[in-house]
């Protein structure tokens, strides 16, 4: 489970730049399956979904305020380094690469996704760990479809900061 804080994206429409762009914060849920390669190195494949968030910006040429929505799903292959092995409290760093599926409601696209993570895991009971961490995530770009006289809106450079908590179970 996570809470996603989006950075302000770059928005354009028919070559016109936007100002006051923003994406609201939203909830994310996900899961994954992984493997320990050694006491300190592990990897996993994860799927995370960020629920619909409002996207807003003002067209610099017309002064029109545009609103749309964005939901995103990311599939990542990640590698982590656990400092101190698998102790009771284990700090870690990680990085991941994969793809995102960005949906504005009127159009959807797939793009490159990448992540950097840091966190702590706490042993709860025989292989069960509580995990608390931070993830910086690049989700690529999104676009709305053109409708009537309105051209497609591009939402570029989607970055998100996520505070995440979860459970991890180590099968031995």
Image (cartoon, helix red, strand yellow):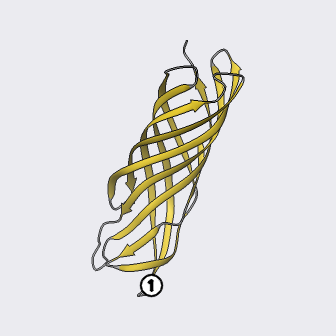
Q: Nearer the viewer, residue 42 or 64?
A: 42
Residue lying at 50% horizontally and 71% vertically, measured from the top left: 56
Q: Is residue 116 left or right of residue 10?
A: right
Q: Residue furthest bottom?
A: 62
Give the x, y percent position of residue 6: 55, 59
Residue to which mark 1 is pinned: 60
- Seen in the picture, residue 163 relative to 18 is either above or below; the reply is above
Residue lying at 39% horizontally and 60% vertically, measured from the top left: 141
- Residue 88 figure quarter: top right
Classify the position of the C terminus by image quarter. Answer: top right
Q: Nearer the viewer, residue 128 or 54?
A: 128
Give the x, y percent position of residue 121: 66, 30
Question: Mark 1 Cα within 10 Å, few/some/many (few <14, many 20+)?
Answer: some
Residue 1, visible in the rendered structure: no
- Seen in the picture, residue 27 relative to 172 is either above or below; the reply is below
Give the x, y percent position of residue 5: 59, 56
Secondary structure type for disc 1 = loop
Residue 83, visible in the rendered structure: yes
Residue lying at 48% horizontally and 66% vertically, measured from the top left: 9
**So how many labels did they put on this image?**
1
């Amino acid at each position: 489970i996570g809470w996603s804080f989006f950075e302000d994206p770059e928005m354009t429409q028919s070559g016109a730049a936007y100002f006051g762009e923003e994406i609201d914060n939203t909830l994310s849920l996900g899961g994954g399956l992984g493997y320990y390669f050694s006491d300190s190195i592990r990897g996993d494949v994860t799927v995370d979904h960020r629920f619909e968030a409002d996207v807003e910006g003002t067209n610099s040429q017309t002064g029109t305020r545009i609103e749309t929505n964005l939901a995103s799903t990311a599939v990542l292959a990640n590698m982590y380094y656990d400092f101190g092995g698998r102790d009771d409290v284990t700090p870690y760093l990680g990085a991941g690469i994969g793809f995102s599926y960005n949906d504005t409601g009127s159009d959807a696209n797939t793009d490159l996704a990448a992540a950097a993570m840091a966190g702590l895991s706490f042993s709860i009971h025989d292989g069960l760990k509580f995990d608390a961490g931070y993830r910086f995530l690049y989700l690529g770009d999104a676009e709305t479809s053109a409708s009537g006289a309105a051209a497609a809106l591009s939402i570029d450079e989607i970055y998100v900061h996520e505070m995440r908590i979860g459970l991890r179970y180590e099968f031995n």
